[in-house]
Image (tube, grey):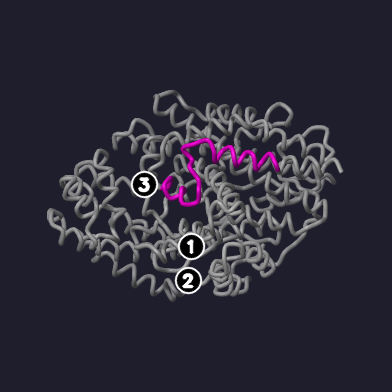
Amino acid sequence: MEKRSQIDNRYKWDFSDYFKNDEEWGSGYKEILPIINSIKEYNGKLNTKESILNCFKLLERLSIQLEALYIYANCKRDEDVSNTKYQAMLNKILSILTEYDVACSFIEPQLSKLEDKFLKKLLEDNDFKDYKKFLHDIIREKPHILSESCEEILSLVSSYKDAFSQIHSNFESGDLKFNKVKNSKGKLLPMNHKLADIYLRDKDEVLRENAYKELHGAGKRYNNFLSANYLGSVKKDVFFARVRHFDSTLSSALFYEEVDKIVYQNLLENVEKNLFLNQKFFEIKRKLLGLKKFKLSDIYFNPFVSHKKYTFDSAINIVCDALSILGKDYTDYIRYMAENRMIDIYPNEGKVNGAYETMATKKTPRVLINFMGTAYDVSTLAHELGHAMHSVLSDKNQSTFNANYTIFLAEIASTVNETILNNYMLNATKNKNEKIFFLNEFLSTFYATVFRQTMFADFEDKIHKKVENNEDVSAKILNDTYFELVKKFFGKKVKIFEEVKYEWNGIPHFYTAYYVYKYATGLISAINIVENLRTGKITIDDYIKFLSSGCIDTPLNLLKIVGVDLTTIEPFNIAFKYLSERLAMLDKLSKK
């Protein structure tokens, strides 16, 4: 793998519109602390319209500056996690963010003491139109806002909240070492996360199995450490839920997202009811592959296109052609991102695994991927660009405090892009094997995003409830709980390896409690949106309006703009019908 310095600059993201260089970042960092301290001038004075409005304006200014400082340092660190310079910069800004939280800790308690009548009057005041979400949350969260002294203590403690996640991230990216894996010829091959993605798609059955076992079995060597770290994170979640007077971590998570518990229940119940479709997919795939027994290591193998390679430029063209149904403005901005170094494209030594999109308020988005030219990488690119377009449109059309769409909505635009791209690729080919390939890619995505993420959600819910009920939770219980869920979700016809019981300790999203279920509701919503666009139930303008709405209403109400109501079972029925149709298509092709 190449070093960062060996990659041409045109393939690396450029942050000059954030800060021209590290020195300018340092100057911005030095300027921020005095501004943070000026917030304290409003302590005890938040009882008039004028003082509240001026305080909000200062918070908005600080939010914009801090976000840019954080994203620059975090993204530069992610270019190469072994670069201690950027790790130090990130640590510095994280410390400043803690000071900011402490300095602001009086605001919510003091505003929560004001009468609802006064706060609702401000909510209707045109001068506060840019701060509606902030005021709405104050009114709604009153029962969970503590005294000023307690809020200050929680702000101080918050500097440690992300420590468990950071430990896991640093371990996975820098310290976790894999053993070499053998292929069918007995040759030992190097192993890392990115290579594992390649090996699990390789035609060599022995290599797939050995890579799968090592990918998850490596966790066994670090099981005590990773178990202790995760349980520390769960206990942290429970502590913050209890101290804010919630009856559970789940209730806390749903409350702050403004999501009804029925949505979570609908997901778990409807996924369990349709597990047979997940198992049907693997049985069809077993027949296609000519295997006596389908194994966990066969899930991502797709032999029907001979490892077709794409250049980054061709990937951008394909994505834009597919997404042209969303309008020229949509695809023009994607091309603008690609041409102006807003995407960090290729893997390098020390670069974080995976892919993500990030954006500071009133700036431009950045996407990190590890592009190696596979169809999967093209899909990943479309996914992250969906995030980028959601961020751009909300930022353009909403104020700072009203633009930040909730995490519940965060995985919808990305999976709309993926679903449209898959349909485009499927319809663009007459070749039987290519059709099988793209059908398999969609069905694998549905498995990974709906069935798998719901399995993860079930796991973290069980563990949080055990901790909340003061039950004993050990590394063994974590492993066994996960193993039982794997067996339930895959059924008896799939060969399950013992090593999979350690898979949970490699899942980074477990360090953000009750995050993973939103991937599942995101794809279910996305499929509904794609179907609603296809049938004319909604228009492109409706979809762009949804992407432009930020957080000006509850996420469930915003979804109604695009014809999706997750408090009912209709969206789940539509999504599983869509899945069934594609399973039938694959089954039919397998018999030709």
**Residue denoted by label 1:** 75
Q: CA distance from mark 1 to mark 2?
A: 9 Å
- Asked if residue 400 lies in the magenta stretch, the reply is no
* Kind of residue at badge 2: Phe
Q: Of helix, strand and loop, which mostly describes the magenta segment?
A: helix
Closest to the observer, 568 or 357 = 568
Report the front residue among 209 and 407. Answer: 407
Residue type of the residue flagged with mark 3: Tyr
Instruction: State which mark lies toward you, 2 or 3.
Output: 2
Q: Residue 46 lies in what quarter of the image?
A: bottom left
Residue occupying image coordinates x 63% and y 52%: 419
Comes first in the chain, label 3 or label 1: 1
Name the secondary structure under disc 2.
Answer: loop
* C-alpha span from label 2 to label 3: 28 Å
Using the image, tell me which numbered label, if any, was put on residue 160.
3
Region of the chain picked out in magenta, as a range: 555-581
Give whichever of discs 2 and 3 has the lower sequence position. Answer: 2
Q: Quadrant of the N terminus?
A: bottom right
Mark 1 residue crowding within 10 angstroms, few (<14) / some (14–19) / many (20+): many
Give the numbered dot on residue 15.
2
Q: Secondary structure at mark 1?
A: helix
Q: Position of residue 436 (x, y in %)?
A: 78, 48
Q: Amino acid at mark 1?
A: Cys
Lower sequence index among marks 1 and 2: 2
Please state the horizontal and vertical placement of residue 199, each as a whole percent of the image. 73, 49
* Nearest to the observer: residue 257 or residue 238: 257
Q: Secondary structure at mark 3?
A: helix
Relative placement, left or right, of 176 versus 66 is right
User: Quick check: 69 above or below 244?
Assistant: below
